[in-house]
Image (cartoon, rainbow, N blue to C red):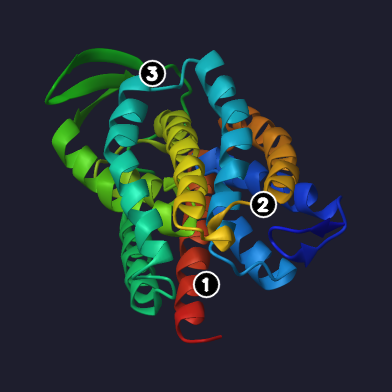
Amino acid sequence: MYFPVAGVEAAPAWPPAWAFGISFFCSMSGISGAFLLLPYQISILGYVLPGVSATNQIFNILACPAGVWRYAREGRLLLPLALIIAAGTLPGVFIGALLRLTVLATARVFLFFVAAVLLYLGLRILLQKGSSRANAEMGVCKVLSKGLSGFDFSFANQAYSVNSLKLMLLSLAVGIIGGIYGIGGGAIMVPFLVSFFGLPVYAIAGASLFATFLTSIAGVGFYSLLSWLWAYPWAAPDWGLGLLLGLGGIFGMYCGSACQKYVPPHILRFLLLVIIFFMATHYLLKALGY
C-alpha cells in the first residue's frame, strides 16, 4: 500500500500491528507510545519528512481516548492534573512546530539535550527507593481541594499536592519537545511527574494520556495550517498512515489501560525505565549519526 503524502510503501497490516504492541505496553505508564512509532516510521518505513511529527499526533488523537475512557471508568482520571498539563503544553506545541519547520529542522544539538535530560530522569528514578510512593493497593483518585495555586488529591490512602505554576512551566518545556517530534509529551512528562513531583504512576497515567490527546489535536491542526499558509506540503500529516496507526493504537491503549492494575508497581517502574533509556539511547545515536 502506497502512502502518497509520506512517500512510502507498507503492507496495510503492519502499521496497526506495530501501533497495537507499542501502545499496549506504553499506556500502562501513561505514555501513548508515539515516541516509539517515530523511529518505526523513520527507520523502517523511511518517512523522514517533518510531516511525520503530525502523523504521529494523529495516532495520539485516535488512540488516547480508549485509554482515557478506561481510566475514567475506574476512577483514576485526575482531570485537574490533565487540564493544567494541557494548558502549559499547548503554547509549547505551537512553538515546537515552528522550530521543527525552521530553526531546528535537523535539531542535532537539541537531540543531545533531550537525551541528557532523559538519562538524568532515568537515573533519578532508578536510584529512588520503592515506586514513588505508589503501592500495590488499587483505589480511586479523589480531589481534596483545588485553586489557582494548585490542588491536592488522595490515592491509595495517601495524599499528594501539585503546584500549578511549577507544573505549567514544566509542561511548556515538554510541549516544545512534543511539538517538534510529535510525541505528545507523555514520554517526558510522566518521568518528571514521578521523579520531581513524587506522584504515583497509577494515578497520573489517565491524566497524561488525556493531556496528550488535547495537545495532539492542536499539533495536527497547527502543522496542517502551517503547510497551507507557508506552502510547506512536506509538513502536512499523512492521514492514511496516521489512521492505520491510530486503529492499532485504539485497541492497544484500551487493553493496556485495562491490564495496568494487574501489573505490580515495580514492574511498571521497570517498564518506565526501559522506555526512558531506550528513548534516550535512540536520540543520542541519532544525534551522532547512527
Mark 3, residue position: 141
Q: Secondary structure at mark 1?
A: helix
Instruction: Specify the amino acid type for callout 2.
Output: Asp
Residue under numbered circle 1: 282
Which comes sooner in the sequence, label 2 or label 1?
2
Q: Quadrant of the N terminus?
A: bottom right
- Between circles 2 and 1, the one closer to the viewer is 2
Rate crowding at label 1 as few (under 14), some (14 to 19) or many (20 or more) other CA atoms within 10 Å.
some
Looking at the image, residue 253 lies above or below residue 105: above
- CA separation in Å, label 3 and label 2: 38 Å
What type is the residue that disc 1 sits on?
Answer: His
Could you tell me residue 50's position as x and y percent? 53, 63
Q: Residue, x 51% and y 58% (percent of image)?
A: 231
Looking at the image, residue 161 sits to the left or right of residue 67; the answer is: left
- In the drawing, what numbered circle is on residue 238? 2
Q: Position of residue 65 (x, y in %)?
A: 58, 27
Front residue of this view, candidates 60 and 259: 60
> Which mark is first along the chain, 1 or 3?
3
